[in-house]
Image (spheres, rainbow, N blue to C red):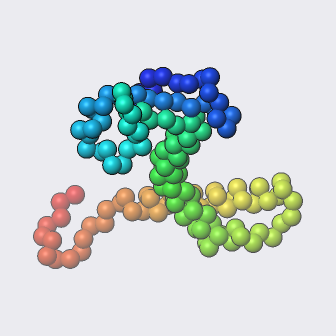
Amino acid sequence: MTVLSNSFGKNLFDAYVFSAHFDLDTCSNCELREVCRIKFQKKSCVVRFEEKTLIADQTRASIKIELQENTSQRAAIEGTNSALKRGHGADNIKVRGLYKSKVIMGLKFTALNFKKFARCITSQVEKIPSHPDYGIVIP
């Protein structure tokens, strides 16, 4: 929708009111007339909304897009955090102080990364099948 004119002189609730004017023929034949917020007048059809409404709609749309992206990233991070807590005891470290805690957690992350790297290397090596139904194995 294109805002054709705005009424900067009118100040309702300390917000600007935007208005868009459309032709009567266009709006009367529209398929979405029942769900539209348009007001029919004598000469044209008008949609009015405040600046707060426009900003809220734009924010709501951006949050919906960012939520989908953040959800997939958060799921990956939560899996790593859960592995640290279960496998390496990250929820109960035995040191005090910020510096020592950072060192211990760094070592725990390093151990987790080594385990992931070892698992990656071992899964990439193909094993020669020993089952006789596979026929002759040519390296």
Q: In the picture shown, does residue 7 fall above or below 100?
A: above
Q: Quadrant of the C terminus?
A: bottom left
- Measured from the top left, where is residue 2 in percent x and y? 41, 27
> Toward which corner of the image does residue 91 lie, by quadrant?
bottom right
- Measured from the top left, where is residue 44 in percent x and y? 36, 29
Q: Residue at x 63, y 57 (%)?
A: 110
Q: Is residue 59 visible?
A: no
Q: Nearer the viewer, residue 134 or 86?
A: 86
Q: In the picture shown, does residue 58 fall above or below 11?
A: below
Q: Residue furthest bottom?
A: 132
Q: Nearer the viewer, residue 9 or 111?
A: 9
Q: Quadrant of the N terminus?
A: top left
Name the side, left or right, on which 130 lies relative to 103. left
Q: Nearer the viewer, residue 40 or 93?
A: 40
Q: Residue at x 51, y 43 (%)?
A: 57
Q: In the picture shown, does residue 7 fall above or below 106?
A: above
Q: Residue furthest front?
A: 42
Q: Residue at x 48, y 55 (%)?
A: 72
- Measured from the top left, where is residue 3 in percent x and y? 45, 26
Number of labels in the image equals: 0
Q: Residue at x 16, y 77 (%)?
A: 132
Q: Is residue 23 visible?
A: yes
> Toward which corner of the image does residue 31 lie, by quadrant?
top left
- Measured from the top left, where is residue 94 in percent x and y? 81, 70
